[in-house]
Amino acid sequence: MDAAIKPDSVVPNDFQRFSAEHPDITPVLFNGAAAQKNFIRLVPTAPDLPHRRLPSTSPAQTMRYQDKFVTWREAITARR
């Protein structure tokens, strides 16, 4: 659960390097609010990157599975 994540325990991947090596991967899609919040907090270039928060795939998220599925599918296929 997101509530169990201790902010000082979060260690980001080297996203700046990854995005430099893969510039066509946009937007960055987040699996819920905690992922987006940590990304913005820990990645200096985050505000400059196109990004979108999607509903968490956690069962704690109150949205119906089918609605989550449609939202995620639309976000993933939007660039195709």
Image (tube, rainbow, N blue to C red):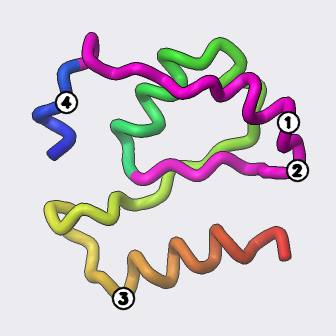
Residue at 11% across, 33% down = 4
Q: Which residue is mark 3?
A: 66
**Disc 3 to disc 1, how far (Cα)?**
34 Å
Residues at circles 1 and 2 in contact by the CB criterion of under 8 Å: no
Circle 4: element type? loop
Assign a secondary structure to mark 3: helix
- Residue 35, position as x, y percentages in the image: 41, 39
**Quadrant of the snapshot with the C terminus:** bottom right
Given this view, does label 3 or label 1 mark the residue nearer the observer? 1
> Label 2: which residue?
24
For the residue carrying disc 4, how many other residues have a C-alpha within 10 Å: few (<14), some (14-19), or many (20+)? few
| Residue 15 percent across, percent down from the top left | 65, 28
Q: Is residue 32 left or right of residue 12?
A: left
> According to the image, label 4 marks what residue?
5
Q: Quote the CA–CA distance across marks 1 and 2.
A: 9 Å
Work out whether 18 lies above or below 60: above
Among numbered discs 1 and 4, the one appearing first in the sequence:
4
Q: How many marks?
A: 4
Q: Residue at x 62, y 24 (%)?
A: 14
